[in-house]
Structures are given as C-alpha cells and as structure tokens.
Image: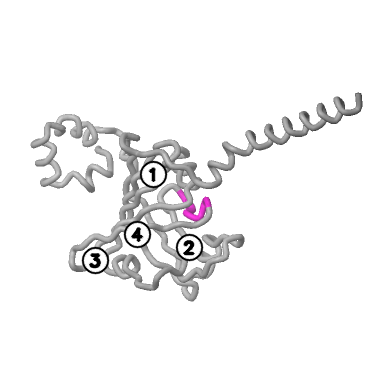
C-alpha cells in the first residue's frame, strides 16, 4: 500500500526528477506507507472547517491548468463525510473557467492555507456540479444564511488523496478577525488604565 497522493502524483517523469535531484529514496517511503491518507481524519476536518478561502486547480480540454481562488465566510467549505467536501459556488466574473473545466474533466486539486500558523493542506479529488433545480437539498445544506451572496450552483468533491505540506517558505499573514482577537485585549486593558487614571486624577482634585 502507498499514500494515495503518491499514486496520483508520482508519475514516471516525477520519479525521474526525484532521481535527478537526489530525493527519490526519501520519497520512496510514501510508496511504502501503511496509511493511504484518502479519508479525512478529525485533524483535516477541523482544519477545513476553519478556512475562509482556498485555491483550486482544474485543467481544460487543451491541457492548460487554471488556478482559482474561492472565498467566503469561515466554514463555507463544508465536510459532508470523511470522503466528501462541498461548497456553495457564488456568482463571480461569469467566465466559468473552473466550471467548464470540471464539466470536461472532474479531477481537481486544492490548496488550503493557514498563513497565520504556517500550515498548508493539499487535496486531490473528483468534482461534480450540482444545481438547485436538480438537488435543492444540497444547495440548502451548503448555504450560509448569514452570508449575502448569490449561489449559482454547488460543487461536491470526492476526496482521492490529501497531504500536509511543510511550513517552509509560508509567510505568516493574518486576517482582520485574527488581528482583532490579538489587539482587543490590549484595547480593553488600555481603556481600563484610562479609567483608572481618570479616577486617580479626580480623587487628587477633590483633595
């Protein structure tokens, strides 16, 4: 048995590159692993549910890859079960590059980033597009009532493999919510100190 991602990505040309640059022996361990890592565990599920964006790659009929950023409220990418994730696809620039690519080739690759903690999860899967006219219950399950955006369709992805990347070269970045969480205690403390100072000055003036 081997890691599922190695079965997908370690093509003959990739193995040749590993030989050329001296990493073939180390990467061989992925092909000898007991756990295929094609079913999400609690760690992956928690990570996925905490994301507010991701990058996805699809390929057109002409062989050209296309990478797209998808974003929404935290948790908009939902875990259906250990092999299935999905999201409501909001209206964008209406070029439909990813949608068209998926209609031609269901294979998809995704990068989920946690810049603040320098973590990165790679997913490989097979995507299918769902419309409200076909399966409205899926659209409803993936919708967020608190996020005002027009849903055109849903995309369900069957997980074929996943892999965690090393944190090297990930520059830490922080969302507005993450910055607020760090700054808010300082602001509260500052307000308390100002109130204490005002009280002290008031007491001195009354003497």
Q: Which is more N-terminal, label 4 or label 1? A: 1
Query: What residue is shown with label 1?
Result: 39
In the picture provided, is 206 more to the left or to the right than 102?
right
Judge depth for marks 1 and 3 and give the one in front.
3
Q: Secondary structure at mark 1?
A: loop
Query: Which class describes the residues within 10 Å of circle 2: few (<14), some (14-19), or many (20+)?
Result: many
Whether the magenta-drawn stretch holds residue 199 is answered as no
Query: Which class describes the residues within 10 Å of circle 3: few (<14), some (14-19), or many (20+)?
Result: some
Judge depth for marks 1 and 2 and give the one in front.
2
Q: Which is more N-terminal, label 3 or label 2? A: 3
- In front of the other: 140 or 18: 18
Residue placed farthest to the right in the image? 207
Compute the Cα span from label 1 to label 2: 22 Å
Judge depth for marks 3 and 4 and give the one in front.
4
Q: Secondary structure at mark 2?
A: strand
Q: Secondary structure at mark 4?
A: strand
Q: Which mark is residue 88?
A: 2
- In front of the other: 41 or 115: 115
Please give the range of residues in magenta: 74-81
Query: What residue is shown with label 4?
Result: 68
User: Contact, CB < 8 Å: mark 1 with mark 2?
Assistant: no
Query: What residue is shown with label 3?
Result: 60
Query: Which class describes the residues within 10 Å of circle 1: few (<14), some (14-19), or many (20+)?
Result: some
Compute the Cα span from label 2 to label 3: 22 Å
């Amino acid at each position: 048995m081997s890691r599922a991602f190695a079965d997908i990505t370690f093509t003959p040309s990739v193995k040749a590159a590993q030989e050329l640059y001296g990493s073939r022996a180390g990467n061989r361990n992925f092909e000898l692993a007991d756990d295929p890592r094609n079913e999400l565990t609690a760690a992956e599920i928690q990570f996925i549910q905490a994301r507010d964006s991701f990058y996805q790659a699809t390929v057109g009929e002409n062989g050209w890859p296309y990478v797209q950023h998808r974003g929404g409220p935290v948790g908009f990418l939902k875990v259906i079960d250990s092999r299935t994730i999905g999201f409501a696809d909001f209206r964008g620039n209406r070029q439909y590059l990813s949608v068209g690519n998926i209609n031609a080739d269901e294979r998809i690759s995704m990068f989920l980033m946690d810049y603040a903690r320098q973590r990165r999860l790679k997913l490989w899967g097979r995507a299918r597009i769902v419309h409200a006219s076909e399966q409205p219950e899926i659209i409803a399950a993936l919708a967020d009532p608190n996020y005002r955006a027009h849903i055109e369709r849903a995309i369900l992805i069957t997980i074929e493999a996943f892999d965690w990347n090393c944190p090297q070269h990930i520059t830490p970045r922080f969302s507005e919510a993450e910055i607020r969480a760090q700054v808010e205690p300082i602001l509260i403390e500052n307000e308390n100190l100002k109130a204490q100072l005002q009280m002290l000055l008031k007491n001195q003036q009354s003497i």
